[in-house]
Amino acid sequence: LRQHGTWNAATGRCTCVDPFRGKFCDNMDCPATVALIGGGPLNSSPQRVDDADCSNGRGLCREGRCFCKPEFFGPSCSHARCPNECSGNGQCFQT
């Protein structure tokens, strides 16, 4: 059995190592899409505003992997498929 954390007697909880979570450190995080705002000339430090597993409902997280709905793809389901996959005549670049 692999350990993904250590027991912390002071808190009575497991301290998990990334990307594991949960009471027993047995749940693995899925890839996340992180949106940043700011970072332009008026705001030099961007702020994280979204950190959602499998891109907010575009897929389901199971054992650290996103299983995307048919209309999406990518490690975190953050890319939308093009209609008819461009009919095989090019590449589609949608997010």
Image (tube, rainbow, N blue to C red):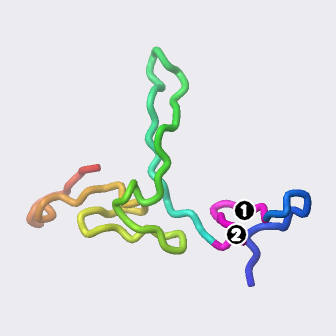
Taking the view exactly as shown, the residue that stands out farthest to the top is 42
Circle 2 sits on which residue? 25
Q: Quadrant of residue 82?
A: bottom left
Horizontal side, residue 63 vs residue 16: left or right: left
Magenta highlight range: 14-26
Residue nearer the viewer, 66 or 12: 12
Q: Residue at x 72, y 72 (%)?
A: 24
Look at the magenta stretch and give its main secondary structure. Answer: loop
Q: Indicate which disc, 1 or 2, sits on the residue closer to the N terminus.
A: 1
Residue nearer the viewer, 10 or 40: 10
- Disc number at residue 17? 1
Q: Count the labels in the image.
A: 2
Q: Residue at x 8, y 65 (%)?
A: 87
Q: Residue at x 34, y 67 (%)?
A: 68
Residue nearer the viewer, 53 or 79: 53
Image coordinates for residue 37, horizontal then vertical, percent: 44, 31
The amino acid type found where label 1 is placed reads: Val
The amino acid type found where label 2 is placed reads: Cys
Q: Are marks 1 and 2 in contact (CB under 8 Å)?
A: yes
Instruction: Quarter of the image for the N terminus: give it.
Output: bottom right
How far apart marks 1 and 2 lie (CA) works out to 8 Å
